[in-house]
Image (cartoon, grey):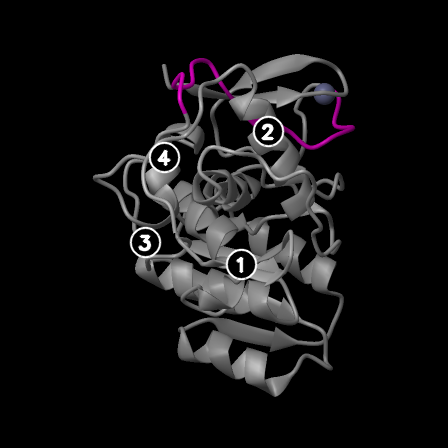
Amino acid sequence: MTNAFLHCDACDTSHSFAAEYRGCPNCRRAPLEVRYRDLPRALTPDGTERGVWRWRHWLPPVSARPTLQEGGTPLLTIAPGLLLKDETRNPTWSWKDRPNAVTAAVARHFGFARLAIISTGNHGGAAAAYAAVNGLGCTVFCHPAAPTLHTDLMSLYGASVVRGGDQELLLEAALSGGETFPGTTLCPRPGFTNPFGVEGFKTLAFEVVEQLGAASPTGSTWPPAVATASTASGRASANCASRGPPTGRRE
Ligand SMILES: [Zn+2]
């Protein structure tokens, strides 16, 4: 039995840690989320690991944890009392490296051969990079107007880039063979609900607390997109509830 399991808030059911991505198998009304039976008392990173896997005790348990040394980004003071987490310092210059490091490792853990995602930008580049480092193929379905800079980056990392068409139908078709795993969103529609990658976003919140010297910020602002990152911030707080302060490095 692993430390992790899947849970549906909509019908309050729990499910085993498995490659589930089509939402709750009981009610099919909501995406699942990863929960953990037992978390460390203190938010202390694993000093033997690199990248997001420093926080592996709060991440899905996987058999291999490849990293491009994502995370560990600086927390910059840009005005009195206002801090900016500079996520452009990540390997593909985007915070999307965090969820894709986890999604790709989970896909590999469960024996998938390929990632497939919908993206017009940095999500696709990050997915392509982490698919490659995990020995997986990658397909990115893009809007016809996707910037060439981004699609070139995806291609350079080895992804197959598909422009145009109905991206959701194309993704569903890619998943139908059973060898392809979808990228991360929390969108509740069936077929697009990989619950694992968002766990990688939590490491951003963990690092902020660590960098503040075991203190929490009084507030935080996140780009909205599909709210995966802000959702992860809330999940990170929930994981830390009733836990001790973090220890380890501070930048
Ligand atoms: Zn349910």
Q: Which residue is mark 1?
A: 95
**Residue flagged by tag 4: what amino acid is it?**
Arg
Q: Which residue does the numbered mark 4 point to in the structure image?
A: 56
Specify the farthest residue to the bottom: 148
Q: How many marks?
A: 4
Of the numbered discs 3 and 2, the one sitting upstream in the chain is: 3
Q: 78 left or right of 58?
A: right
Q: Are marks 1 and 4 in contact (CB under 8 Å)?
A: no
Three-letter amino acid code at disc 1? Trp
Report the residue marked by disc 3. 67
| Cα gap from disc 3 to disc 4, whole angstroms | 12 Å
Q: As displayed, is residue 93 above or below residue 243?
A: below
Q: Residues within 10 Å of mark 1 (few under 14, many from 20)?
A: many
3D distance between C-alphas at marks 3 and 2: 24 Å
Magenta segment, prevailing SS (helix, strand or loop): loop
The amino acid type of the residue labelled 3 equals Thr
**Near-viewer residue (186 or 110):** 186
Q: Nearer the viewer, residue 139 or 42?
A: 42
Choose the circle earlier in sequence order: 1 or 4: 4
- Identify the residue at horizontal 45%, vertical 67% (top origin): 89
Q: CA distance from mark 1 to mark 4?
A: 18 Å
What's the amino acid at mark 2?
Ser
Q: Secondary structure at mark 1?
A: loop
**Percent x, y of residue 188:** 75, 38
Mark with earlier residue (2, 4): 4
In the picture, measured across the screen, residue 106 lies left or right of residue 120, that is left
Is 34 included in the stretch rendered in magenta? yes
What residue lies at 45% left-to-right and 59% top-to-bottom?
Answer: 74
The reply to whether callout 3 and callout 1 are in contact (CB within 8 Å) is no
Quadrant position of residue 119: bottom right
Categorize mark 3 by other alpha carbons within 10 Å: few (<14), some (14-19), many (20+): many
Identify the residue position indicated by label 2 in the image.
237
